[in-house]
Image (tube, helix red, strand yellow):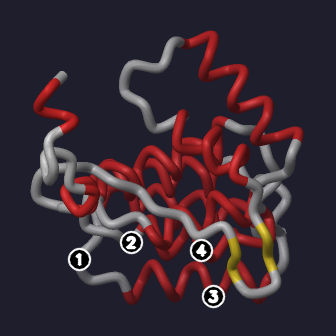
Amino acid sequence: MKELLDDGALDPKKFFDKDNYNTLTIALNNGKEQYKEKDIDVLIGLLDPEITREDKETKLAIVKDNKLHHLIIKAVVEAENDEDRAKLLCICWESGLDFMEHFLFFIEQACDPDFQVALEAYTAAENIENVRDEEILTRAILMIEDCKSGQKQILEDLKSNILSRRI
């Protein structure tokens, strides 16, 4: 306990040392969007590897009830490591929120070379069943075809899923 009270023992800069700590930072204010600290806490709580299934279900319900689409997307964009990005992408489809307006974002993320990130993004895109606009589907196919360093099988499966949506 004495060590914690010593000057310099607790250096806040250490918590932002990416080599030794896994830190996710999300700004409360993003221009016109204002996020609530409690919503950010819920999202960060879902990243806890020790979270119980019951607590996870409760937090996912809060995410859905508060319609935290934009906050999750912002967190995915700002995540500095693949593990956090994959977990956040998983929250997207586990929450049951309608991410239709972000469909192409998930296609972009599915092109990621990291297997877990690509898989979670693929799952999120696959769960957005109501995308049928031909222009969006064509753009998604082009994005997949332009992807050079992605997971080939995931991208093939995603392309098949998108092609099956065409009328």
Write down the residue under mark 4.
105
N-terminal of the pair, mark 3 or mark 1, is 3
> In front: mark 1 or mark 4?
4
Q: In this view, does 148 lie above or below 91?
A: below
Query: How far separated are the C-alphas under marks 3 and 2?
Result: 14 Å
- Image depth: mark 3 or mark 2 in front: 2
**Quadrant in the picture for residue 9:** top left
| Residue 109 locus on image (x, y percent) | 46, 69
User: Mark 2 — residue?
Assistant: 111
- The residue where tag 3 is placed is 139
Q: Is mark 4 on a helix, strand or loop?
A: helix
Image height check: is 106 above or below 36?
below
Tell me which corner region of the image, top left, top right, bottom left or bottom right, holds residue 62.
Answer: top right
Question: Where does residue 127 sit, x and y in percent of width and height?
Answer: 69, 47
Residue at the image position 18 percent from the left and 61 percent from the top: 17
Query: What SS does tag 2 mark?
Result: loop
Q: How crowded is mark 3: few (under 14 residues within 10 Å), some or many (20 or more)?
A: few
